[in-house]
Structure formats: structure tokens, C-alpha cells
Image: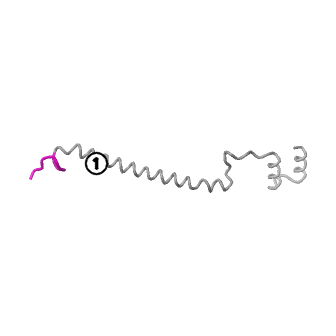
Amino acid sequence: MMWDGNGYGGYGAGLGGWMMFAFMIVFVVAVVVGIVFLVRYLAQASSLPAAWSAGMPTAAAAPESPKDVLKRRYAAGEIDRAEYLQTLGDL
């Protein structure tokens, strides 16, 4: 039995069928790429607050004063007591 071209086997359905197939491929690829970007965005967004609480400086943080830097260096053992007191007196 011969088909009349209105179904999937006729000559008239060739171009339309290929265009629909190409559109479906493009649509599936776009959905997969969108899901990948969404997962990466959500993973990055969820890790930011933990990084901030770990001591990562923010843009709104005030710069350290010279006395704070001196105290931090003395506490870390970078300078001794005499140098600390001398520099503190100079400030």
C-alpha cells in the first residue's frame, strides 16, 4: 500500500521531518547545557558563604589600622617585645 505523503513515509514529509528532528536535537542539547550551568551556579553560590566565614576578606571590610597590624605581627611572633614597644611608641 502506498502512502499519500501525509504520514511519515511520503515524499512530502522529508524536509519537515528533518527540521523537526534537528529542532529536537537542538532543544535537548540546550536543556542539558542549561542544567549544567544551573548546577554549577548553585554549587558556586552555596560555597561562597562558607568561604567568607573562613576569613576571606570582603569588599566592605575596613582596612587594618597600623596598630592592628603591629599587634598581629607581635602575636604571630614576627617581631619581639622591644621592637613592638619601639614601633608602638613611634606610632
Q: Is 8 left, or right, of 87 in this rendering? A: left
In the image, residue 74 lies in the stretch drawn in magenta: no
Assign the magenta stretch its main secondary structure. loop
Q: Residues within 10 Å of mark 1 (few under 14, many from 20)?
A: few
Residue 30, how many percent across, how many down?
Answer: 39, 48
In the image, residue 2 lies in the stretch drawn in magenta: yes
Residue 63, how many percent across, how many down?
Answer: 74, 45
- Residues drawn in magenta: 1-10
Residue topped by disc 1: 21
Residue found at the far left of this picture: 1
Taking the spot 62% from the left edge, 56% from the top edge, the residue there is: 50
Q: Is 9 left, or right, of 31 in this rendering? A: left
Residue 41, how many percent across, how many down?
Answer: 51, 51
Q: Could you tell me the amino acid type at mark 1?
A: Phe
The colour scheme used to paint the residues is one colour
Taking the spot 82% from the left edge, 49% from the top edge, the residue there is: 70
- Please tell me in which quadrant of the rendered image residue 18 appears: top left
Q: Is 39 left, or right, of 66 in this rendering? A: left
Q: Secondary structure at mark 1?
A: helix
- Please tell me in which quadrant of the rendered image residue 55 appears: bottom right
Residue 2, how many percent across, how many down?
Answer: 10, 50
Q: How many marks do you count on the picture?
A: 1
Taking the spot 83% from the left edge, 53% from the top edge, the residue there is: 74
The C terminus lies in quadrant: top right
Residue found at the far front of this picture: 60
Taking the spot 17% from the left edge, 43% from the top edge, the residue there is: 12
